[in-house]
Amino acid sequence: MKKIDISTYINKIKLTSCIMNASGALCTTDKELSDLLNSSSGAIVTKSCTKKPRKGNIKPRYFEWNIGSINSMGLPNLGIDFYLNFFQNKKIKKPIFLSISGLSIEENFFLIKKANFSKKITAIELNLSCPNIKEEILGNNLYKISDFLESIFKFNKKPLGIKLPPFFKEKHIKNISLILNKFPIIFVTCINSLPNGIFIDINKENTVIKPKNGFGGIGGLIIKPFALSNIRKFYTFLRKDISIIGCGGISSGKDIFEHILCGASAVQIGTQFIKEGISVFDRLKKEFIIFLQKKNYSSINNFKGKLKNFQ
Ligand code: RRO
């Protein structure tokens, strides 16, 4: 039987498997990150971090049902120093993406500068799309994003990518792509959770999470069509050296195939990782390889971005 290679590149960064965790999913604490280091995931991204540790929102702040999840975590994290120290004295065999999500432009500058000093951090995933904080989502403000990136690339030397919110109009994706194409970013991750959803417990007739009267970011299976459409559109509008990391609604090998067919170079697992635990990476890897065997593909380059129109 043909050998199936599921390795990939995010720009010039090699991942031996194209499957990794999504920021926020079991990647906050020492134990969670240690488990990820020992797992078959192709890379690790940390929980988005801030300058100081944050407790996040009041609990319950996460809920899942059969086809989705809702969260209003509120950026709980152990602070950038914890994440930089954690990797400092570890033997590391895969790329490490430090997710940062400063609450102001100045805080983001501080975090990016700090990450630049750490040899263990392969790349920065700049999260411009947290749906659960009161501060503005920069990913939705094209004017600010352009100035912001201009300032960042005056000093930043680390490979850097951006985690984007979902967009629902082609013109928005086109406009943000025109801006991103002007800067040396190496990847985008799309999509973050769909903001301001609500889930109802019909027996109790109430919401299922406590912060913000029950409103939160929606993830999981039900957001897959929006993840796929964002990946597809960004694939057509972004420079070809900007890789796309697909995130949203993956729970099977077939879902990974769909993300890559739309143009993703790698995929992140969020809701399904939280549901299933660390063994999700072994299972998905196996499923994906069997799927490719059946399709007679030997590497992801055989089909990446090659989605055809209906005929
Ligand atoms: O911590 C969160 O509430 C959170 C973040 Br930073 C994010 O980027 N996406 C999300 O769904 N939740």
Image (cartoon, helix red, strand yellow):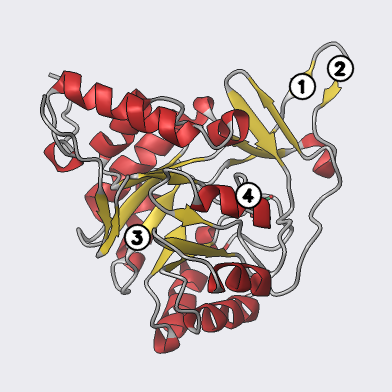
Q: Is residue 310 visible?
A: no
Which residue reaches farthest top? 203
Q: Which mark is residue 187?
A: 3
Image: 187 above or below 6: below
Residue behind mark 2: 205
Question: Rounded to the nearest whole Å, what is the CA distance between mark 1 and mark 4?
Answer: 30 Å
* Mark 2 surroundings within 10 Å by alpha-carbon count, few (fewer than 14), some (14 through 19), many (20 or more): few
Question: Rounded to the nearest whole Å, what is the CA distance between mark 3 and mark 4?
Answer: 25 Å
User: Foreground mark, 2 or 3?
Assistant: 3
Image side of residue 171 versus residue 200, left or right: left
Image side of residue 28 versus residue 242, left or right: right
Image: 15 above or below 147: above
The residue at label 3 has a CB less than 8 Å from ligand 1: no
User: Foreground mark, 4 or 2?
Assistant: 4
Question: Rounded to the nearest whole Å, what is the CA distance between mark 3 and mark 1?
Answer: 36 Å
Q: Is residue 134 visible?
A: yes
Residue behind mark 4: 32
User: Disc 3 marks which amino acid?
Assistant: Phe
Earlier in the chain: of badge 3 and badge 4, it is 4
Question: Rounded to the nearest whole Å, what is the CA distance between mark 2 and mark 3?
Answer: 42 Å
Earlier in the chain: of badge 1 and badge 2, it is 1
The residue at label 1 has a CB less than 8 Å from ligand 1: no
Earlier in the chain: of badge 1 and badge 4, it is 4
User: Disc 2 marks which amino acid?
Assistant: Glu
Question: Rounded to the nearest whole Å, what is the CA distance between mark 1 and mark 2?
Answer: 7 Å
Residue 272, horizontal then vertical, whole percent? 54, 31
Determine whether label 1 and label 4 are within 8 Å by CB: no
Residue 118, horizontal then vertical, whole percent? 50, 79
Find numbered disc 1 in the image and state the secondary structure of the residue it sits on. strand
* Mark 1 surroundings within 10 Å by alpha-carbon count, few (fewer than 14), some (14 through 19), many (20 or more): few
